Image (cartoon, rainbow, N blue to C red):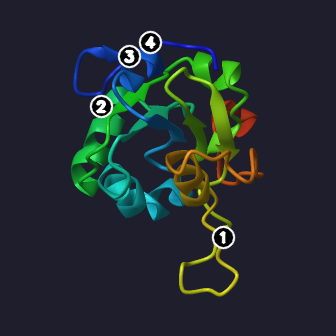
Amino acid sequence: MPDFTLPLLDGGSLSPQSFLAGRKAAVVVFWSGICSHCRRYDDYLNRLPERYPGVGLLAVASRQNESAPMLRVTVAERGLRFPIVHDAERAVAQAWLVSQTPRVFLLDPQCRLLYRGAIDNFKYPQDPEFVPYLDTAIEALLAGQTPPRAETPSFGCPVESVYYTMPKP
């Protein structure tokens, strides 16, 4: 996957390549502070590094019209603990072909793509039809296997839309 370096919301900057150093893998999630689908995964994303030691989580905030100050308020209000970089111009989202949030990418230590798509099939874990796509991919990677699915369709809120820039009456 193309490398990038973006500013962290809490200062400094980070790239997937540097973030992967010393890790077994990394999940890069394109995320938004105002997307209701992303909010649904707050607890899941906060706990992901604890559930999978050695697998890092890096969020990329690319949604149009979300400023760094807005994102910092969201992080504080929702108690988010994962690193978030700000892709204010949406250049990384465009390079990675991301059109909605959340969209996840599982990368190996060489920054090679192993899985991309949805976190799950948007069912709750208690639902008998629940399919944990990302967990399944991570568990396969940690077991030394290829994830059973390389890609799933994702769903969520648009990263960019003409609606955001249309004049309001």
Q: Earlier in the sequence, mark 4 or mark 3?
A: 4
Disc 1 to disc 4, C-alpha distance:
32 Å
What kind of residue is marked 1?
A: Val
Quadrant where the N terminus is found in the figure: top right
Disc 2 to disc 1, C-alpha distance:
35 Å
Q: In which quarter of the image is residue 103?
A: top right
Q: Residue 5 carries which label?
A: 4
Q: Where is residue 148 in the image (x, y as percent from the top left)?
A: 73, 54
**Residue at which label 2 appears:** 69
Kindly indicate whether the residue at mark 3 contacts the one at mark 4 (C-beta within 8 angstroms).
yes
Disc 2 to disc 4, C-alpha distance:
19 Å
How many neighbours does mark 3 have within 10 angstroms: few (below 14), some (14-19), or many (20 or more)? some
**Residue at which label 1 appears:** 131
Q: Can residue 84 be seen in this view?
A: yes
Q: Is mark 3 on a helix, strand or loop?
A: helix
Q: Where is residue 5 in the image (x, y as percent from the top left)?
A: 44, 12
**Residue at horizontal 47%, vertical 33%?**
61
Disc 2 to disc 3, C-alpha distance:
25 Å
Residue at the farthest front position: 144
Kindly indicate whether the residue at mark 1 contacts the one at mark 3 (C-beta within 8 angstroms).
no
What kind of residue is marked 4?
A: Thr
Disc 3 to disc 1, C-alpha distance:
31 Å
Examine the rendered structure and indicate whether residue 67 appears above or below residue 103: above
Q: Residue 139 carries which label?
A: none
**Residue at which label 3 appears:** 18
